[in-house]
Image: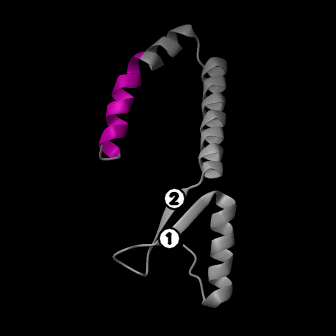
Amino acid sequence: MRRAHGDRGAGRDRRLIARAGESHKAHPGDGRKFLLHLTQAGRDRLAEERRRRADWLGAAINTVLDADERRTLEAALPLLSRLSAHLHGT
């Protein structure tokens, strides 16, 4: 993680945040922190990136796996979801 030094560093951080599609405000309980919120542009970029990744993975699955292997993978999805939920604490 990069630390901002002086106004120039903080300015660069603000410009980076704006380009990334996020807005920020000071943390209410700790002035050293700030809260990030996705703007509509950021949400759109995130949705597009997720769509691209899903297309990429789907193409790889269809190219590499045969029909039986795709069915096996599909049957394993509930197990993978449980593992993911456990790892992410949900």
Amino acid at dot 2: His
Residue 75 on image: x %, y %: 40, 16
Q: In the picture shown, does residue 69 fall above or below 29? A: above
Q: Is residue 76 highlighted in magenta?
A: yes
Magenta highlight range: 75-87
Asked whether the beta carbons under mark 2 and mark 1 sit within 8 Å of each other, the answer is yes
The residues bearing labels 2 and 1 have C-alpha atoms spaced at a distance of 9 Å
Residue 27 on image: x %, y %: 41, 73
Foreground pick, 74 / 30: 30
Amino acid at dot 1: Lys
Residue 50 on image: x %, y %: 59, 38
Which residue is disc 1 drawn over?
25
Q: In the picture shown, does residue 46 fall above or below 63? A: below
Which residue is disc 2 drawn over?
37
Q: Main secondary structure of the magenta part?
A: helix
Residue extending farthest to the top is 67
Q: Is residue 39 highlighted in magenta?
A: no
Give SS at disc 1: strand
Q: Within 10 angstroms of label 2, few (less than 14), some, or many (20 or more) residues?
A: some
Quadrant of residue 79 within the rendered picture: top left
